Amino acid sequence: MRQGYVFAVVVVKNHLTMQINNKNSRVTTATVGFIRIGDKRQLKRALEAYWNGKISQEELIERANKVESDAWQTQSEAKVAQIGVGDFSLYDHVLDWTYRFGLINKRFRHLKGLDQYFAMARGTKGFDGHEALDMTKWFDMNYHYLQPVIDRETLKYASSNLNDYISRIKRAITQLSVSRIRPIILGPMTYLALARLQGGVTMDSCLDYLIPIYRDLLKTLKSLGIVQVQLHEPILATSKGKTLKKGLERVLGDIQSDSPSIDLVSFFDDVGEDMYSWIVNLPIAKISLDLSRGNNFDFISKFGFPKTKVLGAGIISGRNVWRVHPERLDPTISLLRTLTNSGVNVVIQPSCSLQHVPFTKTMESKSIGCSNAHSLYPVLSFAVEKLEELTLVKNHIENPSDKWLDKCFDAWSKFFKANSPIVSVKKRLEGLTLVDFERKTSFKTRSKIIADHLPRLPTTTIGSFPQTKEVRRLRVQLKRGHISLEAYRARMIQLIAHTVGVQEGLELDIIVHGEMERTDMVEYFGLQLNGIAFTAYGWVQSYGSRCVRPPIIYADVTRPSPMTLWEFKAA
């Protein structure tokens, strides 16, 4: 045990938690959000069971609470000192705040409770059905949020209710202890900047409504014993940030009269040089910055950081699946060590919520779907591994003689040695010219060819036909080795022929082959390429119950053999 640490075992309502205190250190750890779907997509299964009428609302909430509690426990067991809570969502966190603020559009106002919530998320069916809120990308991530729409009528009839959020925080207090949790709140500037304001509604008129809600929420959290909250304002790391300065100054001036201290959290990029100088002078206790990308590191180096505030150092990337690289980490660690020696308190944390990476690599086979897995696996880091890295980085800042970074360097050296650049790929890239990006025939020529063979208004269908139970069964049999590849393809050819025949019978003009042989399109092509790996359990939430397994591009990509030929020949 390193000198200075005191381990205190605290029993809170039958829950055993471990607190780690280091009275001599200016460095600790925190999280700013975690995976919401569960380690095995338990939330997805619960949602789909509820939508299909197989479980009750009570059971859905019970299962969802279990997923959330397990996420808290995972962070607790990783010895994270300050755990971000309140970010969990049944569908989308932006929708959650829309629902809590009571900013419900007219077409959903006749519904109540979860019926209303899921109608906003998914729409309603039937002759008089209503479309869901529009879905769009959460900044430059593959996650999608539901865009709030605020007009005069919505503001007029709005009535807030944050009981579900307060209940969530109370559960976290019971499980983790009040001193250890950091409630996560979506900031008003980000919320409004991402919303669609209509009918003469302005940001100022929305703030007139929202500021009292935020003020009352913070007052309630303080009464529960909360010492600090995370106010997430990622919009500050975009070009819109400069236009929101006055609004945020107004918010911070109006909501802190009786509140916990505030940690202003930005992520996904740097805040800009001018914005940095402004942010460090705001009346807040902690400033959390993304140090994994952008120029925040340079701003701190150039302008310094005030000793009167705590720096949330977003070192561990929450966007990618890679272990920290010593050569990239060393300068940041040196800077943070200098800051702590000068009297600045530093919190080591992920650059953003860990909801954007898979749960843990330990669920994967070490073959991880590629030929060079022996070198790839050691340099992967999913959410659980990133929690471990928080403590490892903290320990290395406190103890430079720690050998952890040497092990990282060794793993990366072996990886780069096994996956060195391919000379032929490099030559082909260097040989590219503008001509390679141009079509060999003009649009006019191509249009004439199409016109000569198709009617003026041709008919077709989407590329993918439904994946039937038989198709899924065949795929499982092939994967388990119960049938040969030849037998699998023979049956697929029959199914493709049936698909083509259906379209010919319907007299469609442009025929598609149906893609019966494909699971996920990206995975189907990626598995036929070198340099790309696929996980078995590396699920990441795209929205609601929709989860994807992103491919991992780890080396130069090459195509060892032709693709899609047998399918198209069959068609």
Image (spheres, helix red, strand yellow):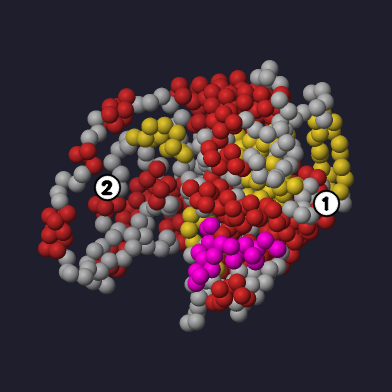
Looking at the image, is 213 positioned above or below residue 310?
below
Residue farthest bottom in this picture: 127
In the rendered image, residue 39, in percent from the top left (x then y), is placed at 63, 48
Q: Which residues are magenta?
A: 193-212
Q: Quadrant of residue 445?
A: bottom left
Q: Relative to 218, does residue 334 appear above or below in the rendering?
A: above
Amino acid type, label 2 = Leu
Asked whether 194 falls inside the magenta stretch, the response is yes
- The residue sitting at the top extreme is 401
Disc 2 packing (10 Å; few <14; some 14–19; many ≥20): few
Three-letter amino acid code of the residue under disc 1: Gly
Q: Residue 552: x and y, percent?
A: 47, 39
Q: Is residue 395 above or below residue 51?
A: above
Would residue 548 be found to the left or right of residue 406 on screen?
left
Q: Which mark is residue 225?
A: 1
Magenta-colored segment: predominant secondary structure: helix
According to the image, label 2 marks what residue? 565
Q: Secondary structure at mark 1?
A: loop
